[in-house]
Structure formats: C-alpha cells, structure tokens
Image (spheres, helix red, strand yellow):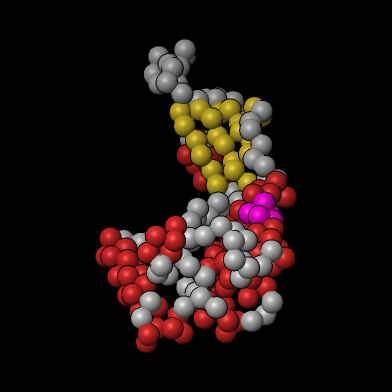
Amino acid sequence: MPLREIAAAAGQRNNSAVRYHFGSGTDSSSGGPAAAGDLEFAEPGRTIRYRYCKGVDIARGVPGRSSPGRWRTAGLPALVAGGGVAGALLLHFRDPHTPGSYGICPFYAVTGLWCPGCGGMRAVHNLTEGRVLDAVHSNVFVLPLLVTVVLWWGSWTVNRWRGSGGSAFPFTLRPRGQWMLAGVLVVFTVLRNTPWGTWLAPV
C-alpha cells in the first residue's frame, strides 16, 4: 500500500496529525526510487514514528521524540499567572499612593504633567481592594487592559493544554490601529492634564 494511503488511513483511525516523507535512495531490486519513508503520528502527549519499506508488511517502530505531557505544557502559563499574582500582591501591600514608594515618573518629574501610564499602579492597588471606580479614576485604561490579558491567558492556557500552542500575544495591531491607539493616548494625556479632565487624573 502506498505510504500516503497508509498515512491517511492511520490518521483517520487514530484521530492524530500525520506527517510523512520519502527516502531519496534507490530500490535495489528495480533500480527505481526507493519506496521507503518515515511515518510520524503526532498525538496529544506523544509522538510515534514508524519506518515504512517497500515489500514489508510490518511497520517497525523507531524511537521518536515524545512531546511534553499536558502538565508540563501548562507550566509556562502557570509561571506567568504566578508572576501576575505576585505583582498584584506587591502593589496591594506596598501602597503606590505613598509618595516615593516606587520612585517617580520621569515624565511627571520633568514636566509636572501626568503621562498616559501615570496612575497605573494605583489602579491595580485599588482593584486589589475592590475599589473599581477609584481604579478607573486612577487610570481608565488599566481595567480593560487587565481583562484583555486575563482572557488571553485563559485561551493560551487551554490551547497549550490541548497541544495546539496558541498566540504568543493577545492581539496584533495593523498600522492603522497603531495610529488610532497613539491618537487616543495623546488625547487622553492632554485631557487628563486640563481642568475639564480632572476626573481622569490619578487618585
């Protein structure tokens, strides 16, 4: 049976991803291209490779690389989550509202104006205390950004658990989107430093 037919049948039977390739030698009996190749099954948690040869009915198993188990694939998402929780705990117990607790914003130190990131740590601290409105007041972008990151982390974790990898970043912005985001940040920065935008200034 041709190797392609074997691969298709095996993939349907085992519900696994199948990869195969042919050898580049010649058949000693006919002088034609060798009807031999490697047949590889990628299943959740393991990879199995078989050697296929012309005229041989029995596939001989060849040791292949085993893909990491599900618990090992979940290690990186767990590490990222642990880092996020550690950062939130630090901001909760070391209050960024205390002057000098985390230094000072260079932009604010030079200009005396709030930058787009000012109030971000205060917003996280407020969220750890359940004060959502104060968090929005401190920096309106922090809450939607955190929600986006948490949703991405959940999707990333599930994809890695299933063995499908997943995106390395929550989203990508095309040039037009990048310009729009930059414009929103500029407007936000200007507005929060005016008498009409005091509700956007950090608290």
Q: Can residue 171 be spotted in the picture?
A: no
- Magenta run includes residue 82: yes
Is the stretch drawn in magenta largely helix, strand or loop?
Answer: helix
Residue extending furthest bottom? 196
Q: Position of residue 137 (x, y in %)?
A: 52, 81
Residue 188 position by quadrant: bottom left
Span colored in magenta: 77-83
Q: Nearer the viewer, residue 104 or 171?
A: 104
* Residue pictured at 50% horizontal, 53% vertical: 168
Residue 83 percent coordinates (x, y): 66, 55
Residue 71 is at least partly visible in this image? yes
In the displayed structure image, the side of residue 69 where residue 12 appears, left or right = left
Q: Nearer the viewer, residue 35 or 128?
A: 128
Residue at 32% x, 66% y: name it.
182
Where is residue 88 shown, x and y percent of the image? 66, 64
Task: Decide: is 200 above or below 33.
Answer: below
9 sits left or right of 186 in the view: right
Give the residue at x 40% y 14%. 31
Does 164 appear in magenta? Answer: no
**Which x, y percent locates residue 200?**
45, 80
User: Quadrant of the rendered structure where residue 191 is?
Assistant: bottom left
Of residue 68 and residue 197, the one placed in the foreground of this image is 197
Tell me the quadrant of the picture where the C terminus can be found. bottom right
Residue at the image point whose x is 37% and y is 85% from the top: 195
